C-alpha cells in the first residue's frame, strides 16, 4: 500500500472518530409547552425562541393545539405545542434552562397582562430513564394526556416510550383521555 493511500485511510479513520464523538454529544429532547393565560400563541413562540437560543436547535415543532380546561369552569383553554430539539446539555441543565425561561415568561406576563402561565415539561431525553427528586423522564403523565399525545404523534409518531415500549401513535390509540384537542 502506498503512503498516500495509508494517509487517506488514516484521515478517514480520524474523521469517523470525530463524527462518532460529536454525535454522541447530541441528544434528542422532546418538550411540551403549555400556556393558558395572556397571549398564549405569543408566549409559546417566545418560549420556543428562548429554547433555541439556550437549549439547542428546534428540529421540529408541532402545530398549536387547544384543549378546554375542564373542572374549573372559569379557567381559560390551554394551548399546547410539542417541540423536538437537538441539545448538547445534560438533562438537569435542560431543566435549569426551562425553569429559568418559565420564570422569565411568567414575569413578563405578570407585569404586562396581570396573568402568567407557561409550563415547559420535558417529555423525553433520548431513550433515557431518569428518576431524581427534580426530574422524572419520560414525563410520568405523557401517556395519559391527549393534549400531549396528539402533538407528540404529529412530530414524532415513531418515537418509542422507553418504559412502555410503545410509539406515540400506539400510546395515542390506547389513551382513554377523550378530551377534545383541536389544532388551531
Ligand atoms: P406541572 O408541570 O405538573 O404543572 P410544574 O411545572 O410546577 O408542575 O413542575 C413541578 C416540578 O416538576 C418542577 O419543580 C420539576 O422539578 C418537576 N419535574 C419532574 N419531572 C419533570 C419533567 N419531566 N419536566 C419538567 N419538570 C419536571
Ligand atoms: Mg411543568
Image: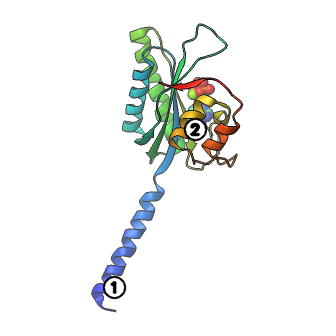
Does 92 appear above or below 47? below
Instruction: Count residues near mark 2 (Cα–Cα under 10 Å), then give few for <14, some for 14-19, many for 20+.
Output: many
Tag 1 residue: 6
* Quadrant in the picture for residue 114: top left
Tag 2 residue: 123
Residue 39 versus residue 91: which sits nearer the camera?
39
SS under mark 1: helix
As drawn, is 62 to the left or to the right of 132? left
As drawn, is 133 to the left or to the right of 77? right
- Image marks 1 and 2: residues in contact by CB distance under 8 Å: no
As drawn, is 51 to the left or to the right of 82? left
Q: Where is residue 101 in the image (x, y as percent from the top left)?
A: 44, 28
As drawn, is 73 to the left or to the right of 155? right
| Residue located at (61% from left, 42% from top) | 168
Question: What is the quadrant of the N terminus in the image?
Answer: bottom left
Ligand 1 is within 8 Å of the C-beta of the residue at disc 1 = no
Amino acid at each position: 500500500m502506498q503512503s498516500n493511500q495509508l494517509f487517506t485511510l488514516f484521515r478517514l479513520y480520524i474523521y469517523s472518530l470525530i463524527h462518532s464523538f460529536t454525535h454522541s454529544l447530541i441528544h434528542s429532547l422532546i418538550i411540551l409547552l403549555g400556556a393558558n393565560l395572556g397571549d398564549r400563541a405569543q408566549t409559546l413562540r417566545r418560549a420556543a425562541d428562548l429554547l433555541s437560543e439556550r437549549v439547542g436547535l428546534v428540529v421540529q415543532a408541532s402545530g398549536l393545539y387547544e384543549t378546554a380546561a375542564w373542572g374549573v369552569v372559569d379557567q381559560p383553554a390551554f394551548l399546547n405545542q410539542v417541540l423536538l430539539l437537538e441539545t448538547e446539555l445534560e438533562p438537569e441543565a435542560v431543566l435549569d434552562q426551562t425553569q429559568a425561561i418559565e420564570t422569565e415568561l411568567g414575569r413578563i406576563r405578570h407585569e404586562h397582562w396581570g396573568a402568567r402561565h407557561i409550563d415547559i415539561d420535558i417529555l423525553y431525553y433520548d431513550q433515557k430513564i431518569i428518576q431524581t427528586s427534580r426530574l422524572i423522564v419520560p414525563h410520568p403523565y405523557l401517556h395519559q394526556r391527549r393534549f400531549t399525545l396528539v402533538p407528540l404523534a404529529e412530530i414524532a409518531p415513531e418515537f418509542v416510550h422507553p418504559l412502555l415500549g410503545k410509539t406515540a401513535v400506539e400510546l395515542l390509540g390506547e389513551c382513554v383521555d377523550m378530551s377534545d384537542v383541536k389544532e388551531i
